[in-house]
Amino acid sequence: MTRTDKDLAAHLTDVISFNAVDILAYFERRVGTNDAADLVAETMLTAWRKAADVPKDTTEARMWLFGVARNVLANADRAERRRWRLADRLRLMLAPENPAPASDAGVDVRDAVARLEPDLAELIRLVHWDRLTLAQAAQVTGIPASTARSRYQKAKDDSAAARAARVVPTYAQAMTASQQVGRYGLALRKRLLAVGIATVLALAVVWLIAVPIGPEACALSMPGPRNCFVSDRVQAAILPTIVIIAGALLSVAMLLERPKNLRMISAWSVVLLIMMAGASYVLVAWIPALAWMWRSNIAP
């Protein structure tokens, strides 16, 4: 029993309606949203042309419709590749045999030509960019061929001199900049080293002299003040240590931030760190002992 055209149309309509969203998603995942709708329309048109081939089973009809979509996609890919090949051939056919220099090619040459006198620059352009002979260039510019030859030689000499004058200062400037960077780096390392040494010395005064030795007045009075005990001096040394480290970090930050004042910043930093070391020694080791001696009416 054969199906009538009405039955085929109804069956195909049901198959397309049931699978249209999936077919659209199939194309969107492969060619993007912009071209997917056109390929879906092409698939539906092809399916209607082959309506007699649609299987009766719903699952088989779905697979058949996806097969049609796959063939449509393959045909679209082949057509796209043909268009690209045709476009490439057209570009090759339309490309000039002797194109003008690219905007980013020969910058130094064009700059040197631009520095020439207008008539000399035009003669160079006609010969080298437009591929004219000297005689033809002379005819275009309306001058005798002998004049064109002498001007061409002068233009070449002037252009070479201009290019050399442009290159040499650039190289010299680059070398000067490199030397300046090297000198700055060396000076910065020296200043950082000076600040680091001053910081280490300040911390050594606190932790290697003030904390373990303490004030000599402790040996003259027994029992001595609290600062005559090492444990108390350790507690007293914590705050000066924090201040010394903070000062060192501030000095390093200023050295990095103000490269023009390296010498002044490093000098003041070293002086302040030395002053911090002296003040810290007095605070950790002597202040409590002096206060005890003052209260006991003992001269220091």
Image (spheres, grey):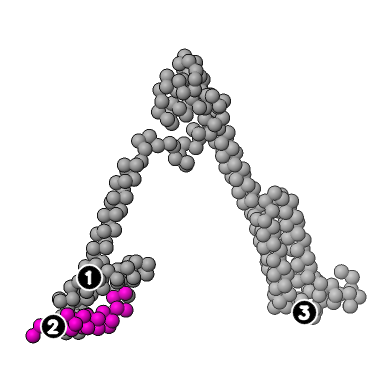
Q: Nearer the viewer, mark 2 or mark 1?
A: 2
Q: Which residue is mark 2?
A: 3
Q: In the drawing, does residue 82 fall left or right of residue 173?
A: left
Real-space CA distance between mark 2 and mark 1, rounded to the nearest whole angstrom = 19 Å
Q: Which residue is mark 1?
A: 46
Disc 1 + disc 3, Cβ < 8 Å: no
Real-space CA distance between mark 3 and mark 2, rounded to the nearest whole angstrom = 114 Å
Disc 1 is placed on an element classified as helix
State the image coordinates of residue 208 (x, y, percent, origin top left).
68, 66
At horizontal 49% and vertical 33% (from top left) the residue drawn is: 109
Residue 167 appears anywhere in the view: no
Residue 226's mark? 3
What type is the residue that disc 1 sits on?
A: Thr
Disc 2 + disc 1, Cβ < 8 Å: no
State the image coordinates of residue 231 (x, y, percent, origin top left).
70, 78
Q: Report the front residue among 114 and 193.
A: 114
Could you tell which of marks 2 and 1 lies nearer the N-terminus? 2
At horizontal 29% and vertical 78% (from top left) the residue drawn is: 20
Q: Nearer the viewer, mark 1 or mark 3?
A: 1
Is residue 244 positioned above or below 266 on the image?
below
Q: Residue furthest top?
A: 146
What type is the residue that disc 2 sits on?
A: Arg
Q: Which class describes the residues within 10 Å of circle 3: few (<14), some (14-19), or many (20+)? A: some
Q: Report the front residue among 194 and 297.
A: 194
Q: Which residues are magenta?
A: 1-24
At horizontal 41% and vertical 25% (from top left) the residue drawn is: 132
